[in-house]
Image: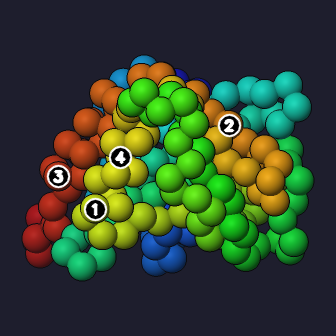
Amino acid sequence: MSTHRGMIMGPLALALAAAIPASASAQSEFYAEAPPFTIHSERESHACSMANSWQHRDAGTIMLIVLESGEGEDEFSSIAFTIEESRKPAGESGTQDLAIYFLDNDGVEIDAGWGEREFIYQPDGELGKGHLFLFNFYGDQNRTQAMADISNSKAVSFYMDGELLAAMPLEGAGPAVELLKECAANLTTPQDGT
């Protein structure tokens, strides 16, 4: 297993712990690769993720994580990111309104359709500094639209109080989202004795 794949394991556990508190000890398994994204599954939490990380000259390590999770009424999709160096929100953990912008989304230069959303955030223990931010999309329409926006856009950016907090390229996200959906569809509840 490569260092790149190993890097994703910690933030995935953090993202899952933030999204599904009971999964803090969850262990993920490699599922597939759709460069530049890697897809992992976590059977216990019924979740799959796609993730990629970048080095930024000012922000340090930035990682984007997209989760697909749940069964029945608990289904959700999430977008999460870790950022090593950032303007800290107030407090070590809590909630923060962030504006989501998709760039070059199916012919729309700047798609601000999601507006501001309340993200939860917590310190990123894997990096030793910085924060993990996470927002859950609930409902079929929101989940479908979020995955379409991630698949069809060239980049995503997050703004806090009108200032850029983080931005990530989404080239290659379309095939990764398809594998993410496939991964989530393949997760089944383990049967007793298996």
**Amino acid at dot 2:** Ala
Tell me residue 144's x, y (percent): 29, 53
Q: Amino acid at mark 3?
A: Ala
**Circle 4 residues within 10 Å: few <14, some 14–19, many ≥20:** many
Q: CA distance from mark 4 to mark 3?
A: 15 Å
Nearer to us of marks 4 and 1 is: 1
Disc 3 is placed on an element classified as: helix
Q: In the rendered image, which residue does mark 4 sit on?
A: 147
Which quarter of the figure has residue 75? bottom left
Vertical comparison of 132 with 127: above or below = below
Residue at 67 percent across and 28 percent down: it is: 54
**Visible in this render: residue 51?**
yes
Q: Which mark is residue 185?
A: 3
Answer above or below: position of 95 versus 159: below
Task: Give the camera-side residue of 78 and 13.
Answer: 78
Q: Does dot 1 land on a helix, a strand or a loop?
A: helix
Can the viewer see residue 6 in this picture? no
Residue 99 placement (x, y as % from top left): 65, 56
Label 3 and label 1: CA atoms lie apart by 17 Å
Which residue position holds label 2?
A: 167
With 45 as the anchor, is 162 left or right in this view?
right
